[in-house]
Image: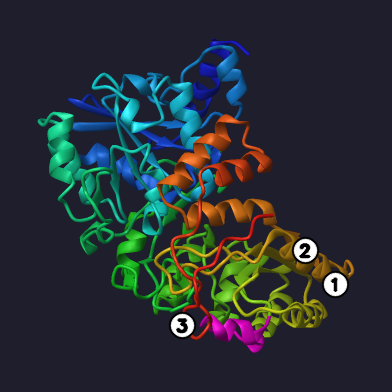
Amino acid sequence: MSVWNLISQIRERVREEEGTLYKQASLRVALCYPSPYSIGMSSLGYQTMYREIHLHRGAAAERAFLPEDTEEYRKSRTAVFTCETETPISNFPVVAFSVSYELEIPGFLEMLDLSGIPALARERTPEHPLILIGGPLTNSNPVPLSPFADLIILGEAEELIHNFLDAALTAKPAELLSCFARVPGCYVPGLSGTLPPIARAGDDRLPARSQILTKNTVLSAMFLIEPERGCSRGCTYCVMRRTTNGGMRLVSPERVLSYVPAEARRVGLVGAAVTDHPRIKEVVHAIVGSGREVGISSLRADRLDGELVGLLARGGYRTLTTASDGASERVRNLVDRKTTEEHLIRAARLVRMHKLQRLKLYEMVGLPGETAEDIDELVRFSLEVARIAPLSLSVSPFVAKRNTPLDGAPFEGVRSIEAKMTRLRAGLKGRVEVRPSSARWAWVEYMLSQGGEAAGLAAMDAWRNGGSFAAWKRAFKNRDVKPFRARPVPDGRRNAPTIPFMP
């Protein structure tokens, strides 16, 4: 494919956008997402940062994404360029990345490489852009990003990005980094020492919301907005639990609805616990009553009732999706997941009552204390639910995250997880749809989520060697990557340190 064809693809996407921002400014920032356009433009945080940078009096942002076909860029020697002005990101003084989770690190490295920017911060010169990193991953463990970053903003960046832009307009990079090494919520590798607490934006910055509407996303033409931020619950595996950044912060229905543009025909309500908002039905009722479709990112089974599910059905729902996140009620109790069989049975009955097509449940396997008997219990219960409404299970291996009570819990093991997946499928015998996530890539995610700088360097090695699972195994072994901490057990005590399972 020619360079012209690659540019034409981007131009076509931009022509189909509503809300794209253009601005002449003293400071131009390349705002990058290390996954393809369709995923990046479905990120509420990414879109929020795009608007926040443009709100600054002296700065403007231009978007860039990981190409869908990176080999075409390599063959044609095309650098990653921005959507707004088709400028290579290497020409910007600041290149900012939003990284959502660990397995996006190879995409981040790929974008730098395609642009001729050295991945390692120590190999860059003053002629190279300053690399700023933020995004959801910084709520958990940003340390694997340290070898590549000049500055990392931890947590909520709506306010800190303005402080950074103020300084970047006047200070030289070295002075800027020296200053921000002492700013709460900011981490400058090599200067800051230990990680500071994550940043919290003021409530006046809420709600985060979409800037651009486009059909070319995972959530096609859906306007995203958060009616709440954070969570009031205490699930021990979750980064966004009640102890994170002050817990749940509510936005009034009136404020939420005031931001929904008239042209938006689909509205997505995004947050860690949207249905825990005490006035969420008012928001949904207003959206559906105006003839729009509605989506909610986190339906909690214990909050579902006939009124809410009826509104969702009117708002275009065909599949009711909620999470169990534990193979049995015993395991859910161990991790403080307040979801009972009764809640899930009621959800299935609501699916049938409102003539939805199916119930979809998110499940985790491999949680601490789980046994084969718990998998058998999941089989029994799934068959019971399937007699009420068609059921599909989306099953992911448990991956311990830093800054949670289960931080340091070992990965169960690829072979053990795969055996449980086989046991589950055999028990359900085609009567329930089972969509398992890869145990191998969950182990890679685990090693990154629990690792330090060596894990980031191993990610670079694996990416350079083709990114296969075998390449990741070799890279972790060669870099001697091990988790940070000792293994927690369900009652909160800790055992002796353990070596992670190597498949």
Badge 2 is on which residue? 434
The structure residue drawn at horizontal position 48% and vertical position 58%, both measured from the top left corner, is 450
Magenta span covers which residues? 328-343
* Badge 3 amino acid: Gly
Badge 1 crowding class, 10 Å Cα cut-off, few under 14, some 14 to 19, many 20 or more, is some
Q: Are marks 1 and 2 in contact (CB under 8 Å)?
A: yes
Whole-number angstrom distance, CA of label 1 to CA of label 2: 9 Å
User: Where is residue 163 drawn, in percent x and y?
Assistant: 16, 45
Whole-number angstrom distance, CA of label 3 to CA of label 1: 33 Å
Q: Which quadrant holds residue 475? A: top right
The structure residue drawn at horizontal position 32% and vertical position 30%, both measured from the top left corner, is 122
Q: Earlier in the sequence, mark 3 or mark 2?
A: 2
Q: Nearer the viewer, residue 475 or 170?
A: 475
Q: Earlier in the sequence, mark 1 or mark 2?
A: 1
Badge 1 is on which residue? 428
* Left or right side of 466 for 381: right
Q: Nearer the viewer, residue 284 or 29?
A: 29
Q: Are marks 3 and 1 in contact (CB under 8 Å)?
A: no
Q: Secondary structure at mark 2?
A: strand
Badge 3 crowding class, 10 Å Cα cut-off, few under 14, some 14 to 19, many 20 or more, is few
Please say whether residue 467 is one of the residues in the magenta stretch: no
* Badge 2 amino acid: Val
